[in-house]
Image (spheres, rainbow, N blue to C red):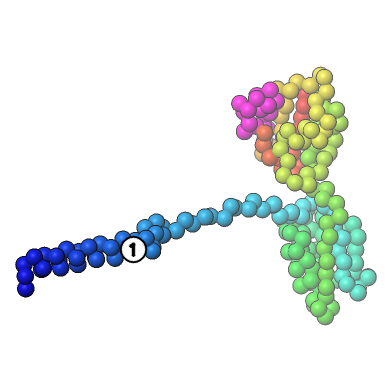
Amino acid sequence: MNRHFSQNLSWAAIALLMASLICLAAACPAAAEPPVVRKKPLVQQEPIYRIGPSDLLEIITWREEQLTRKDVLVRPDGRISLPLTDDIMAAGLTLMQLKYRITKALSHYLEAPQVYVVLTNPRHWEISVLGNVKSEGKFQMLKPTDVMQALAMAGGFNEWADKDEVFILRGIGPRQQRFLFEYSEVITGEKREQNIILKPGDIIVVP
């Protein structure tokens, strides 16, 4: 074979190989980059309401009017009283959990009882705002509520209020906690941690 012809054949093979690689790269551009994975945003769920002392409930037993009760009070010990059942612990349960407990208790006397539990007045989910506010008293928290929101519910400060000596009382007896709330520091963002989320039974005192 002619020497020049062999050299030309080798160069042609190399050129053909390079052209093939270029075409392959052009046909698969995404292979060089990993796929982009987009995370779904987290959805913040509302807290589930749990029954507490002083709440008023309506207990409905379908087709059993004598077992249906309105304004069932959750006692300080957290229990409720119903016909055919012993006292049932309600405090700390969700409405669905209490429904299950009542249904289970009545199933000893009824065939497939259908029970419905309705929260008619969430009285345990209350806070108190006292002192130098425009409208002191008890207020229901229908959603998570901080100190600033509670003060707004009470109409805000009156003209004699000592805004930087506000405090929150939590609990009773020797274990009662006291939290300071300095309005001028909170409103400027310097002590935002004092604007705590309140718990049922908390008392805000405005000197």
Residue 79, picture quadrant: bottom right
Q: Residue reaching furthest top? A: 160
Q: Is residue 193 left or right of residue 61?
A: left
Residues in magenta, as a range: 178-194
Asked if residue 2 is positioned above or below residue 176 in the image, the reply reads below
Q: Residue reaching furthest right? A: 66
Q: Considering the image in quadrants, where does the N terminus appear?
A: bottom left
Q: Which residue position holds label 1?
A: 23
**Does residue 76 appear in the picture of this structure?**
no
Residue 87 is covered by the magenta coloring: no
Q: Give the residue type that dot 1 points to.
A: Cys
**Does residue 204 appear in the picture of this structure?**
yes
Asked if residue 161 is positioned above or below residue 110 in the image, the reply reads above
| Percent x, y of residue 122 | 82, 50
| Percent x, y of residue 197 | 68, 40
Looking at this view, is 1 or 91 the one in front?
Answer: 1
